[in-house]
Amino acid sequence: MMVSLGAALLTTAGCSKDSLLAVEDPDVATPESLADPAVLPTLRASVISDLQVAMGAGGEDGVITLGGLLADEFIWAETFPTRFEMDVRSTNPINGTLDGIYRSLQRARATAERVERTFARVQPTNPLRAEVQALAGFTYVMLAEMYCNGIPLSTFDVDAGTPELGEPLSNQVLYTRAVAKFDSALALIGTPATPTAEQTRILNLTRIGRGRALLNLGRFADAATAVALVPTGYRYNLFHSENSGRQNNGVFLPTQNFPRFSVGDREGINGLPFFTDGATDPRVFSPRGTGVAFFPRVGADNITLMNVQTKYMNRSATVVLADGVEARLIEAENQQRTGGDYVATLNTLRAALPTLITNAALPAAFNPPAIAALPPLARGANTAAEVDQVFKERAYWMFLTGHRLGDLRRLVRQYGRNAEAVFPTGVFHKGGTYGVDVNYPVPFIETNNSKFVACIDRNA
């Protein structure tokens, strides 16, 4: 007993009090641990995850829901005043909901750029570096499609531990920088004689992103060329999951789980008839809710009838970021502008609907339209009608994927249409009248950046 006690005393006496407090925490990732090539796939996953949150995941408002709210895909069916401002086209920069999506998009951009630099330093020839660079390009496109002219892009110098504040940039500059990101991603893959499946997947993602950015720049022929090699059946999915709140699909949650957004139907005179056409077009099928579980009859305001989107039927529903259908739609728009047979391109897609639609199979009780080829379109009677056809097909094929707001802005900016003939206007469905917003303002929180005061302008 005495020997044991003595040994214990000697052991205690030999300990350092400082070492008792130096506890290793294996859950904290140090900068050194992130320089290991084995960590790169995890970093790539973080880029995808942050982009998912920005588009809409984990109960967060995202590009898909809030872009659709300012456009004509969704109408406000609840009571939060911040989202009322968005739907009525009169968003105040101090709007808290606006702040959240702005932070998410800027975070997704910053994560992608930081991870790309890590790839460049640790394993520069890894093809996943090109994928990360392409995803960074998509964040630039989404920022420019959602927000006014005058978006700062700040960074953080990890080595110095200080922020590097960004100057306000026009949408044109953001789209141009997005093209540079996509060009960089293409250069990182190069031109292999026989590309691997992974290289091909990343190349097609990059081509579509590049085409989308060029389309926003008004470089229609270049956009069509950029996507020419993308197969129509290609699809780059963002996968959601039931596993955790962050992984949940962020469109299912506020439409079926807690009803905030009802699908529009000729919203504000100019909106497309999503609900009406959905009776025969499975791309936009949005039946009136009946009040059973996950099929609400009215919104959270207990007034607005719910036209329930069925594109995303559960928390694990997949979101398409880019696909071959978008590539063909970009080509069709260029064909329309140059007098080509754009209708043939649109009708080829319509005929192939059963193989291209991504919506989940629905219960018969929903009375969904048949998943079958859609009837062919006849060429529009005049130029304006042709443009209407192209943009309606874009709206229906890419319904609730974060494209519609950018398209409405392009109709104003590139096609010379009056905003009040494009965006919802007139009497608001809950009283009052619509405002004049065609984009969202950069939120007030950005004024912490000493180089930012306000949007340069609110033009489309």
Image (spheres, rainbow, N blue to C red):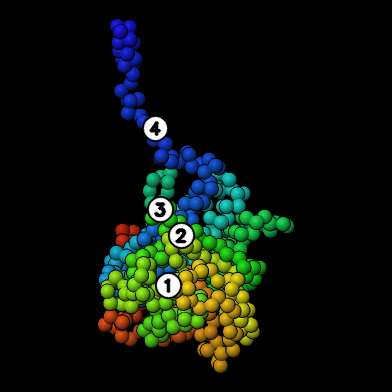
Q: Callout 2, which amino acid?
A: Ser
Give the residue displayed 51% in from the left and 76% down from the top.
Answer: 282
Q: Mark 2 points at which residue?
A: 316
Q: Where is residue 379 in the image (x, y as percent from the top left)?
A: 59, 89
Residue extending furthest front?
A: 365
Report, in whole angstroms, how far the alpha carbon at label 1 lies from the one at label 3.
22 Å
Mark 3, residue position? 244
What amino acid is found at the position of numbered circle 3 in the picture? Ser
Where on the picture, by quarter, is residue 209? bottom right
Q: Residue furthest right?
A: 193
Pick whichever of labels 1 and 3 is earlier in the sequence: 3
Picture layout, residue 50 above or below residue 25: below
Nearer mark to the viewer, of 1 and 4: 1
Whole-percent x, y for residue 387 in the image? 53, 85
Q: Earlier in the sequence, mark 2 or mark 4?
A: 4
10 lies above or below 116: above
- Give the amino acid at mark 1: Gln
Taking the image as shown, residue 125 lies to the left or right of residue 253, namely right
| Label 4: which secondary element | loop
The span from disc 1 to disc 2 (Cα, nearest Å) is 15 Å
Label drawn at residue 24:
4
Q: Quadrant of the N terminus?
A: top left
- What residue type is disc 4 on? Glu
Number of on-image labels: 4
Q: Pick whichever, 236 or 261, lies toward us.
A: 261
Q: Earlier in the sequence, mark 1 or mark 2?
A: 1
